[in-house]
Amino acid sequence: MRTDVAATLTMSSPEPATALLQVAVADPATEQLTVLSDGTPVEPEEFEVDGARVHRLQLLTGDTTVTYSASVQDGGSPRKVTPAEWAEALRPSRYCPSDQLEGFAGTEFDRTRPRTELVPAVAAWVNRRLVYTSGASRPVDTAVDTLLAGQGVCRDYAHLTITLLRALEIPSRLVAVYAPGLSPMDFHAVVEADIDGVWSVVDATRLAPTSALVRICSGRDAADTAFLSLFGGIARFEGMTVTATTDGPLPAPADAPFPLP
């Protein structure tokens, strides 16, 4: 099955600024990235950060439009958990303060269950506990804030799932993806957990089939995986459109962990 993805982002800046983009898929068959800043083509600088393909742009004064498209083919091997990833994915992070929920997680879940059961059980618990509510959370909210509020969007679901899994000593991280079948369409955030030494995806929102997801990047939490970060100057994000389509039928969302290539 082939998947086609695309994203268009617009920004405006009253003075020059620097932008970091993470919209490129991890393993494209074909792709194209174009940037027009104040009507002038800008050549992005690509580099790698912990396996993520990052593009740095120097924005000119005025309006900037970023257009990205890619095609991805099915296939690829499951990603094995390296020792460095294992260590990083166990530690508390900016949005996932797992040390604060160790006692809570221990009373809610049975640590002795095999991870093939425990990981989807945590995702299912988060799905029941939270109400998906657009605009309900703030950019600074942690998983603890989400737990107390009882609502959020995909990144909040992912942060709470990661935090509980780490509190149960299961290495976990956030994955930014394109998600065919997601409605309304947007960039999506899901969770990867270490199951038998392989990174396996669960999605507590249950809004899209995990087997159809297209990987962009992964990180400790949303601080590492933001699709756009603006630095050095004044710039404003104006909006975006995202699409992700397949050339075959989509399966229904499933609870079982899936080893995303």
Image: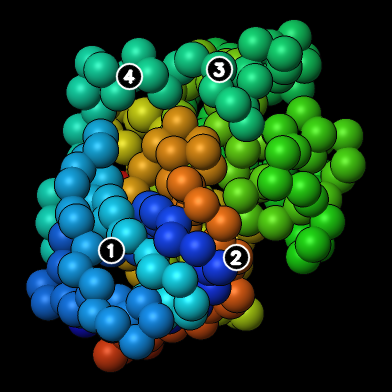
Q: Residue at x 23, y 51 (%)?
A: 53
Q: CA distance from mark 1 to mark 4?
A: 25 Å
The residue where tag 3 is placed is 92
| Percent of width and height locating residue 113 | 53, 21
In terms of sequence position, does the residue under pointer 1 or pointer 2 come before the other?
1
- Residue type indicated by callout 2: Arg
Disc 1 versus disc 4: nearer the observer: 1
Q: Are marks 1 and 3 in contact (CB under 8 Å)?
A: no
Q: Secondary structure at mark 4?
A: helix
What colour scheme does the image use?
rainbow
Q: Report whether residue 80 is seen.
A: yes
The residue where tag 2 is placed is 236
Residue neighbourhood size for the residue with mark 1, other residues' Cα within 10 Å, grouped as few (<14), some (14–19), many (≥20): many
> Relative to the observer, which residue lies in front, 33 or 50?
33
| Percent of width and height locating residue 28 | 16, 68
Q: Is residue 70 left or right of residue 192?
A: left
- Residue type indicated by callout 1: Ala
Q: What residue occupies the far bottom of the structure in this picture?
A: 247
In terms of sequence position, does the residue under pointer 2 or pointer 3 come before the other?
3
> Relative to the observer, which residue lies in front, 23 or 169?
23
Quarter of the N terminus within the rendering: bottom left
> Relative to the observer, which residue lies in front, 57 or 169?
57
Task: Determine whether 234 is above or below 145 in the image.
Answer: below
- Residue type indicated by callout 4: Trp
Q: Which mark is residue 86?
A: 4
The residue where tag 1 is placed is 24
In terms of sequence position, does the residue under pointer 1 or pointer 3 come before the other?
1
Q: Are marks 1 and 2 in contact (CB under 8 Å)?
A: no
Residue neighbourhood size for the residue with mark 3, other residues' Cα within 10 Å, grouped as few (<14), some (14–19), many (≥20): some
Q: CA distance from mark 2 to mark 4?
A: 36 Å
Disc 1 versus disc 3: nearer the observer: 1
